[in-house]
Amino acid sequence: MSPGPGPGPDPSPVTDPATGAGTTDPAVVAARAEAVRRRIAAAGGDPDRVRLLAVTKGFGPEVVAAALAAGLVDLGESYAQELVAKAPVLAGGPVTPRWHLIGRLQRNKVRSLATLVHRWDSVDRLELGREIARRAPGAAVLVQVNITGEAQKGGCEPAEVDRLVADLQAEGLAVEGLMAVGRAGDDVATRRGFAALVAAADRLGLPERSIGMSGDLEAAVAAGSTMVRIGRDLFGERPPR
Ligand SMILES: *Cc1c(COP(=O)(O)O)cnc(C)c1O
């Protein structure tokens, strides 16, 4: 990562000049966010109603600072350790980030995250929800559903959703909606899964439907997404972990 800008213009606002990935220039991030909003509109979504979650995993605090300066306040992180390291660096700035945990989460990581996380967007089992309710009573959550049947993916089985939502509500958690990840490279399965997720949210009366990433934004918006989670199309390719 390049050192922060000194006095005068930063001579190297882009972490990787070859790809433009990891820009620290808020104007670049803002322009990319505008392009994402245009895609949302072109896919039939109202850009004021389909919100943008900026997925900052893999990038350092200076990239996150650029996102905040560009007006992106809802931020997504997949890994507990990474969020624990990043959040304090961004705290106390002019804009307070709203961190969303969007990755697979072990129960023993909940405690370290409890004061940092704005919403737990990938809750997929009751034991995890119980620990969240214990460490952050009344916290806002989304239930992640595995809509594509891929074993390596997080998410509860579609047949378990109603039960899990009810159990999490009984724990005192505020279940705001459902979240899912499409199947990479399979537009048909992805669209079918998104439609099923939206139908389940309708049935359960849950307003938030967090679906759509850089590669399947259009399908998600067409299905009724209320929040797309965008990483690469805002910040470029992530550095390898
Ligand atoms: C990494 C990630 C994203 C962002 O994916 P991009 O392809 O970079 O837009 C969205 N949602 C989840 C759950 C992720 O892990």
Image (tube, rainbow, N blue to C red):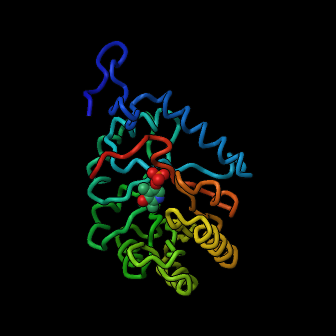
Question: Residue 43 placed where, x, y %?
Answer: 70, 51
Residue sitting at x 44%, y 72%: 123
The quarter of the picture where the N terminus appears is top left
Res 118 seen here: no
Q: Is residue 203 left or right of residue 110?
A: right
Instruction: Between residue 211 and residue 241, name the one nearer to us.
Output: 241
Q: Is residue 96 above or below residue 169?
A: above
- The percent coordinates of residue 108 (x first, y second) are 26, 72
| Badge count | 0
Residue 131, image x, y percentages: 35, 75
From what the image shows, is residue 55 above or below residue 155? above
Seen at 28% across and 67% down, the residue is: 109
Nearest the eye: 95 or 32: 32
Locate residue 104 relative to residue 69 in the image: left or right.
left
The answer to whether residue 210 shows anywhere in this view is yes
Instruction: Tell whether 106 sits left or right of 139.
Output: left
